[in-house]
Amino acid sequence: MPSDLGFAGSVPYVYDTLLVPLMFLDYAEDVALAVAATAPDEVLETAAGTGVVTRALHRALPSARITATDLSPAMLDRAAHHLPASESVTWAPADAHDLPFDDDSFDALVCQFGVMFLDRPRAHAEARRVLRPGGRLVLAAWGRLEDNEAALGVQEALEALLPDDPPLFLRRVPFGYTDVGVIRAELEDAGLTDVDVRVVAHRNRPASAHDIALAHCQGTPVANILAERQLDAEQVTEDMARLLRERWGDEPVSGPITAHLVTATA
């Protein structure tokens, strides 16, 4: 896996304590409602991270059996800290490109803000394989970077601080899968039907410039890039926080965030 795609070391902790509350909570509820609309009994989650969607699914579907998977055991350890395994919820390391489940095993498959990291033709084919006929696929992917104020500020601060070779992870991966035509075509090529893509807008939860900088510099794979370049992540965080305060002021920031909510049928 390329270094700028990995969540390891201290990244899962910072991701869970800062980035998830900043940007993910409202979308977790949106995704859970989209899954619950078909009242599935067996739900598979891929790229579950630290379990923000899993918890929302468990609240929305208390009688469903949820299998939540991620490639990173460290992320799943954090997830289980919030919601211990039970008869209803199973945590399992798994690769979304090569799922260790039989054909036609699940009524629904959900992936929030993980699809951008995947080899999508392989992952969509696997999703189609493990879904029962008529099963529902629900995905969420961030919208354009320009429509996500906090992340845009972080990216432009990185470009100002490292002008010769700015890390492009944010532009390339989490905010790089925004073409609705491409999203639709990739799902249909995998044999999925009734593809629906809609834009969902929220505002990030209020956070200081320092916490926004810390969340992105030490709670995403940007941390891996800084480490590879032998840059001090704490110093980059402080320098970025200064630029973000100059941009937004000292008050907590709550700016627009947008994502695509995608549903399809197997």
Image (cartoon, helix red, strand yellow):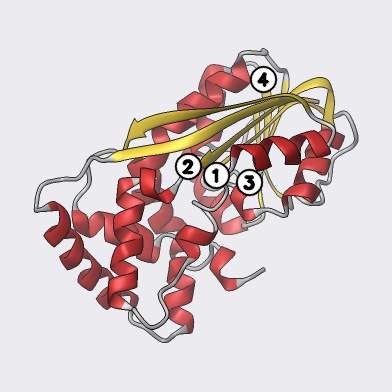
Whether residues under marks 1 and 3 lie with C-beta atoms below 8 angstroms apart, the answer is no
Q: Is residue 255 left or right of residue 48?
A: left
Whether residues under marks 2 and 1 lie with C-beta atoms below 8 angstroms apart, the answer is yes
Classed neighbour count for the residue bearing mark 4: other residues with Cα under 10 Å, few (<14), some (14–19), many (≥20)? some
Q: Position of residue 99 (x, y in %)?
A: 81, 46
Q: Residue at x 48, y 30 (%)?
A: 199
In the image, which is nearer the foreground, mark 2 or mark 3?
2
In-front residue for pair 179/55: 179
Can residue 101 be seen in this snapshot?
yes
Mark 2 belongs to which amino acid?
Gly
In-front residue for pair 6/152: 152
Residue at mark 2 to residue at mark 1: CA–CA distance? 5 Å
Q: Earlier in the sequence, mark 2 or mark 4?
A: 4
Classed neighbour count for the residue bearing mark 3: other residues with Cα under 10 Å, few (<14), some (14–19), many (≥20)? many
Q: Earlier in the sequence, mark 2 or mark 1?
A: 2
Residue at mark 2 to residue at mark 4: CA–CA distance? 30 Å
In the image, which is nearer the foreground, mark 4 or mark 1?
1
Q: Which residue is mark 1?
A: 178
Vertical order, 157 against 165 (above or below): above
In-front residue for pair 26/151: 151
Q: Position of residue 237 (x, y in %)?
A: 27, 69
Q: Position of residue 54 (x, y in %)?
A: 56, 33
Label 3 secondary element: helix
Vertical order, 64 against 261 (above or below): above
Q: Quadrant of residue 138?
A: top right
Can residue 68 be seen in this snapshot?
no
Residue located farthest toward the right when viewing the structure as drawn: 103
Q: Is residue 123 left or right of residue 81?
A: right
Q: Which residue is mark 2?
A: 143
Q: Which residue is mark 3?
A: 115
- Total tally of numbered discs in the picture: 4
Classed neighbour count for the residue bearing mark 2: other residues with Cα under 10 Å, few (<14), some (14–19), many (≥20)? many
